[in-house]
Image: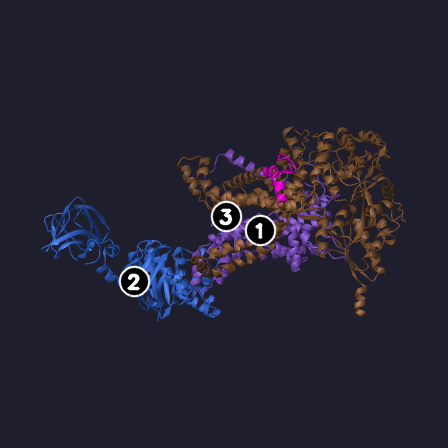
């Protein structure tokens, strides 16, 4: 019973609008990831949910309660801060039990809840340590634990993995997924990392400059990006965008020799994921280009190709037959088409 | 990091530090010398080490009784301790909430309020003793330690607010936000999160309030009418009179008066740098 | 009814006094004797000497005073004007005429005389077998005694009370019988000249003598003759004999010291039985106990002591002059003291000294400004209040502001405790105190004068701007004082902090702990110590200078004889007191600056100084500024050091504004209004300073 809904939500500081009309419905138990470049308003939106920022217009509902007029403590949400915000003068046990202590729960119950969460996060040996005596990963888990103990309606994660190193981040990503499965609680997770978004989310909300770009499942976003921003933001390496114009079953790219056999008329922006670029020898059909750099990632290679004035990246399995300086022809598999001016999907 | 400058520089630096330290301690050693030497004279030679050591002066000062045989010194020491401790507690109670509000919230009048706190530091005390006397008289607080505590605590508020606000500014706000999400009210957040974290600053400000009360004698002498309610600094003044100063007693008293402050200073030394610095950070 | 009668019959009588030692013990015993034979109970309260006068003047008018108090008679004039004392309910009888005279004012006897004191000739019976009877004889004997670091004679030559003997012998006097003082007379000049001869020219007396110093010299067998009172004999470690003061050979008249009479006074509304207690203490049994146990020279004619000191006192009393009880005498004394110091230092001739004393006396005793009409002021205050309320109202008409005030309503609760207590206990007393600046006060008389005090101060109406008494001069000194101090505090504090963070300095923690000691010891104690260290003849500073500069040769630099050295003495003391605070603040601020930044600068080729100047200092500055502003405000009002070390010498030139205000309030004729005006102007200067500091820095300092 903890859906989360933003109804025509707006937020402005003084005269500056930082969130335009967010109108989104998140289902009970859903894992929502808010993603976007820094400064896009995603953290602000999270802080609005928490009640740390006031919204300027619209409504915010958690389950069947309208929460936007409520102070943070009456919203029953738990938050994991980017800095973890562990109370430095309390042990792990005290940190995790703090919220329950505030609610004046009996000591036994608090202990029980703390232990349970600690077991879940493998924090039991650390319970009597102070934050300063722990590593970054451990602190991160304590911050998680503190949120879990609360049994809130909604979890709010503010870039929880950004302070961890790469391998730990990957490990914690898996942990989070597992945790979500066990808790089955609504989670709102803010990140600027699209991989985190794709791997963790049930649904992703992409924000740019305070405007919702797209809201949907990772698959939808990947397969049918709503605009060039989402297209480029989701997926790594980014989708290649080329200015195309088509007529009579052929599409030409400005300044590039060769054509692509696509049935679309008029000018548009052609989007092709690196995995959907097909690179062939000089003799084949397609767009003519030159290999600029080949990056090997072990199992795969990223081949950077100069197509006339445009640079594109193709992803293909290793070993690749191409090396820098080779003349190649490039064909396409799945393509996306966007409006040239608005960038919207056609 | 482990660069070591040239040997002459190291030696010169140490010599300079030792010289400054000697200069800093010399007058204090003087007090010790007079306190531990027999007689009431002002010591007149270069040597700050007593030649004959006696505890007579301390015995005289500590053994002071009044005409009814009450142990006057004990009462006055107790008064001083009570007043000074109460002053730190009341002073902190008055200033922490204000400092926190000034540090965290942007309410109309905040700037003016902060200026007002600073401005009160500029009031020359000379003209205030008699109005204070009248005021306490009107409240029936004359001759009472409570009245004295209130006056001292209030006097210490501006500096305390200044120091504490500076320190609060350095406590990450995320901690308080976390607590509020954990369901804590503003008051509970303040009490359970902010205050424990501000311990160094509280210690330093508390010590300053303590010192304000511990060393003050002009107001204490004006507002208190009974030797049983005098504080130690007032009593020290009786060794300094028109007919000459009883230096031995005065110095012994001075040592006794300085001792608790010194002990507190050294105990809280660690916090000093931390607690005061933050006060220097603008906000 | 019976209970009532009992309580009415058995009152508690509170007596204030400032006696110490044997005198106190005797008083306790005498009171005990009264207790035993009377239904009343007596409570004796010892008030510290320093606070005594001001306590009497604040407590008694508000009904918080005692029933009786014991004090010497020299303030009686002020007390009668202020209504602190009541004519006696039991007439005194059987006392020495001189003692009764002293406590009689305008034909009324105000106090039961207890004891009298005066300056005597005290001498070392192991050195000389008799006291000289003339000054010529005295000089001859003293010369013979002045050998091997010994002195023939010592007395507090620049204190008018001790100078009085010579003054009267030369036919001069502090106050004229018809009121006012004539100090610019040949008699005064002659007395000063002779005083200088005795104290300096003959080379028989130590420099800058204070009571404590003389006592010490005596105990060390380094002085033979002393002009001092009976109190001097109390704490002596060696035998001492007394004789009447000698006859001044030049005039043939005896040195006639002041006679001060200690008396017990009744306070208006004194409890029943107070009068009887006072009379009991003064005569008969009470007097006998005080004479025998307390060694007091009692004024009861029926008691003759066998004690040689008391007999000498009785002898001396015959030629002594009762100390005037007119408050104006304080002005004459202050004027005389200034001139005496100047003459003895050789910065002024006796004739010039007498002239200066007159000028200074005229300044101190100048009439109050004319009375002003208070009505426009009521109107003005009313207008200001209405204006302020109106302004507030106008502000609140802004709906956005109003909304913010309402939204933050609960925030104000957090400020409330501090705000309220400061308003009541700091702002209110200051405003009340400041309002006094619109009045003038002298010797018990109050008058509303409007802005006259401010105009007098600002326009230097009563003396030239270049006089040390002028506001502008003192302001200049104060600014010099503040800036020199702050500069030294910051540079010394910062230098030490920079050294103490170097990892290669050993025992850093120890130095740091020891260096904050000056901060921990109460400053009124250490200021007094520093004053002693700067003594011309016996101070450690001069001894050290002699050791360093002249290989042990004597240095007798009189630190308080010229402005520059006296200012230096103050400055050294206050630098000593103030650098630890700056050191600690700097240490803290340095912690926030990563060493890497400086190291990076050094790697980039910058020298140490350059790295400090361009990297450390810019980062340090914002953290230090608030401490500097606060520190300068404290220094600006650092009363204790000025008052206790230089005491304003020479000629009030080293006074700062706050100590000037204090002098006007408490030692120059109690001109409270004038002092309050000073306080208001001090506040104004500081306010302007802090605003300017903010502007100069271009950002908010605090």
User: From the viewer's perspective, is C353 left or right of C108?
Assistant: left
Drawing shade for chain A: blue
- Is residue C373 visible in the rendered structure shown here? yes
Q: Nearer the viewer, mark 2 or mark 3?
A: 3
Magenta stretch bounds:
C451-477
| Residue under disc 1 on the same chain as residue under disc 2 | no
**Which hue is chain C drawn in?**
brown
Tell me the residue that label 2 is attached to. A201
Residue assigned mark 1 = C380
Chain letter of the residue carrying label 2? A
Question: At x 61% / y 42%, what residue is drawn?
Answer: C455
Please give the residue where the numbered disc 3 appears in the rendered image: C702
* Chain assignment, label 3: C
Chain in purple in the render: B
Q: Are marks 2 and 3 in contact (CB under 8 Å)?
A: no
**Where residue A131 sits in the image (x, y, percent)?**
44, 57
Q: Are marks 2 and 3 on the same chain?
A: no
């Amino acid at each position: 019973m903890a859906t989360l809904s933003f109804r025509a939500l707006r937020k402005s500081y003084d005269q500056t609008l930082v969130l335009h009309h967010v109108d989104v419905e998140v289902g009970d138990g859903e894992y929502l990831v808010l993603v976007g470049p820094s400064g896009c308003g995603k953290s602000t939106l999270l802080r609005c949910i928490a009640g740390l920022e006031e919204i300027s217009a619209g409504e915010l509902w958690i389950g069947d309660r309208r929460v936007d007029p409520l102070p943070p403590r009456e919203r029953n949400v738990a938050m994991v801060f980017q800095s973890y915000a562990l109370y430095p003068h309390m042990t792990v046990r005290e940190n995790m039990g703090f919220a329950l202590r505030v609610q004046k729960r009996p000591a036994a119950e608090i202990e029980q809840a703390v232990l349970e969460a600690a077991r879940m996060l493998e924090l039991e040996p650390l319970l009597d340590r102070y934050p300063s005596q722990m590593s970054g990963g451990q602190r991160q888990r304590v911050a998680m634990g503190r949120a879990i103990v609360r049994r809130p309606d909604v979890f709010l994660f503010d870039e929880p993995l950004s302070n961890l190193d790469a391998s730990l981040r990957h490990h914690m990503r898996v942990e989070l997924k597992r945790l979500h499965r066990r808790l089955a609680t609504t989670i709102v997770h803010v990140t600027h990392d699209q991989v985190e978004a794709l791997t963790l989310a049930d649904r992703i909300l992409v924000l740019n400059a305070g405007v919702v770009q797209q809201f949907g499942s990772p698959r939808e976003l990947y397969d049918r990006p709503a605009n060039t921003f989402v297209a480029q933001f989701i997926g790594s390496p980014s989708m290649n965008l080329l200015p195309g114009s088509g007529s009579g079953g052929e599409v030409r790219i400005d300044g590039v020799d060769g054509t692509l056999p696509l049935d679309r008329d008029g000018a548009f922006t052609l989007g092709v994921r690196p995995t959907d670029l097909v690179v062939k020898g000089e003799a084949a059909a397609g767009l003519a280009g030159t290999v600029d750099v080949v990056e090997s990632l072990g199992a795969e290679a990223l081949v950077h190709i100069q197509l006339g004035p445009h640079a594109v990246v193709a992803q293909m399995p290793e070993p690749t037959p191409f090396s820098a300086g080779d003349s190649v022809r490039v064909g396409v598999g799945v393509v996306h088409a966007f409006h040239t001016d608005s960038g919207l999907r056609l | 990091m482990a660069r070591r400058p040239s040997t002459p520089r190291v030696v010169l630096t140490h010599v300079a530090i030792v010289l400054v330290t000697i200069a800093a301690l010399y007058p204090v050693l003087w007090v010790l010398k007079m306190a531990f030497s027999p007689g009431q004279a002002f010591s007149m030679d270069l040597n700050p080490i007593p030649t004959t050591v006696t505890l007579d002066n301390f015995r005289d000062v500590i053994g002071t009784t009044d005409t009814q045989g009450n142990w006057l010194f004990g009462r006055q020491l107790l008064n001083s301790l009570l007043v000074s401790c109460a002053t730190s507690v009341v002073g902190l109670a008055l200033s922490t909430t204000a400092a926190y509000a000034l540090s965290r919230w942007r309410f109309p009048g905040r700037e003016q309020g902060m200026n007002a706190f600073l401005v009160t530091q500029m009031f020359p005390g000379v003209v205030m003793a008699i109005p204070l006397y009248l005021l306490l008289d009107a409240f029936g607080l004359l001759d009472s330690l409570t009245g004295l505590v209130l006056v001292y605590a209030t006097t210490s508020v501006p500096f305390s607010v200044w120091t504490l606000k500076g320190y609060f500014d350095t406590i990450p706000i995320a901690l308080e936000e976390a607590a509020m999400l954990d369901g804590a009210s503003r008051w509970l957040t303040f009490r359970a999160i902010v205050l424990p974290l501000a311990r160094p600053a509280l210690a330093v400000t508390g010590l300053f309030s303590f010192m304000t009360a511990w060393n003050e004698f002009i107001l204490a002498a004006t507002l208190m009418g009974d030797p049983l309610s005098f504080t130690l600094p007032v009593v020290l003044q009786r060794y300094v009179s028109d007919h000459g100063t009883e230096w031995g007693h005065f110095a012994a008293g001075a040592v006794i008066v300085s001792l608790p402050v010194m002990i507190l200073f050294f105990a809280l030394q660690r916090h000093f740098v931390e607690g005061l610095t933050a006060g220097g950070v603008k906000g | 009814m019976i209970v009532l009668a009992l309580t009415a019959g058995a009152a508690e009588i509170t007596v204030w006094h400032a006696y110490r030692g044997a005198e106190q013990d005797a008083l306790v015993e005498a009171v005990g004797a009264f207790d035993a034979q009377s239904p009343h109970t007596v409570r004796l309260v010892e008030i510290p000497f320093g606070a005594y006068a001001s306590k009497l003047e604040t407590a008694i008018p508000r009904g918080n005073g005692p029933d009786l108090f014991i004090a010497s008679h020299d303030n009686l004039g002020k007390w009668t004007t202020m209504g602190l004392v009541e004519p006696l309910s039991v007439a005194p009888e059987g006392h020495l005429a001189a003692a009764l005279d002293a406590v009689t004012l305008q034909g009324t006897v105000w106090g039961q005389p207890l004891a009298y004191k005066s300056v005597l000739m005290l001498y070392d019976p192991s050195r000389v077998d008799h006291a000289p009877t003339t000054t010529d004889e005295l000089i001859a004997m003293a010369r013979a005694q002045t050998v091997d670091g010994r002195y023939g004679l010592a007395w507090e030559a620049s204190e008018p009370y001790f100078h009085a003997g010579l003054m009267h012998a030369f036919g001069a006097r502090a106050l004229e019988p018809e009121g006012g003082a004539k100090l610019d007379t040949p008699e005064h000049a002659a007395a000063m000249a002779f005083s200088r001869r005795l104290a300096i020219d003959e080379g028989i007396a130590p420099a800058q003598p204070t009571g404590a110093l003389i006592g010490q010299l005596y105990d060390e067998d380094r002085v033979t003759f002393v002009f001092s009172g009976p109190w001097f004999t109390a704490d002596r470690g060696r035998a001492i004999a007394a004789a009447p003061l000698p006859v001044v050979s030049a005039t043939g008249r005896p040195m006639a010291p002041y006679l001060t009479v200690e008396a017990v006074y009744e306070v208006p509304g004194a409890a029943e039985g107070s009068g009887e207690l006072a009379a009991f203490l003064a005569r008969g049994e009470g007097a006998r106990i005080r004479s025998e146990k307390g060694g007091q020279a009692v004024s009861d004619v029926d008691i003759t002591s066998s004690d040689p000191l008391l007999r000498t006192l009785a002898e001396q009393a015959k030629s002594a002059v009762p100390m005037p009880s007119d408050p104006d005498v304080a002005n004459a004394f202050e004027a005389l003291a200034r001139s005496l110091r100047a003459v003895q230092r050789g910065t002024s001739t006796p004739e010039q000294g007498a002239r200066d004393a007159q000028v200074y006396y005229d300044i101190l005793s100048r009439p109050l400004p004319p009375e002003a009409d208070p009505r426009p002021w009521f109107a003005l205050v009313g207008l200001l209040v209405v204006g302020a309320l109106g302004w507030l109202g106008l502000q609140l008409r802004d709906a956005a502001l109003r909304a913010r005030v309402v939204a933050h309503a609960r925030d104000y609760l957090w400020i409330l405790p501090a705000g309220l207590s400061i308003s009541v206990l700091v702002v209110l007393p200051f405003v009340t105190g400041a309002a006094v600046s619109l009045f003038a006060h002298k010797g018990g008389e109050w008058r509303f004068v409007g802005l006259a005090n401010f105009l007098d101060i600002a326009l230097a109406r009563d003396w030239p701007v270049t006089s040390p008494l002028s506001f502008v001069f003192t302001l200049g000194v104060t600014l010099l004082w503040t800036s020199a101090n702050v500069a030294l505090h910051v540079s010394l504090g910062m230098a030490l902090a920079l050294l103490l963070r170097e990892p290669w300095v050993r025992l850093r923690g120890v130095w740091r702990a020891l260096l904050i000691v000056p901060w921990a010891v109460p400053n009124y104690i250490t200021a007094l110590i520093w004053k002693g260290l700067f003594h011309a003849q016996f101070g450690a500073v001069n001894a050290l200078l002699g050791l360093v500069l002249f290989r042990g040769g004597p240095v007798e630099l009189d630190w308080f004889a010229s402005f520059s050295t006296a200012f230096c003495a103050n400055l050294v003391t206050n630098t000593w007191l103030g650098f630890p605070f700056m050191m600690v603040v700097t240490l803290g601020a340095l912690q926030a600056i990563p060493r890497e930044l400086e190291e990076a600068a050094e790697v980039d080729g910058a020298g140490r100084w350059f790295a400090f100047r361009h990297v450390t200092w810019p980062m340090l500055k914002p953290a230090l500024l608030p401490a500097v502003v606060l520190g300068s405000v404290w220094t600006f009002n650092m009363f204790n050091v000025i008052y206790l070390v230089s005491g304003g010498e020479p000629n009030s030139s080293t006074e700062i504004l706050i100590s000037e205000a204090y002098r006007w309030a408490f030692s120059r004729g109690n001109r409270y209004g004038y002092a309050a005006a000073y306080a208001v102007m001090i506040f104004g200067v500081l306010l302007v300073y802090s605003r300017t500091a903010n502007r100069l820095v271009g950002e908010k300092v605090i």
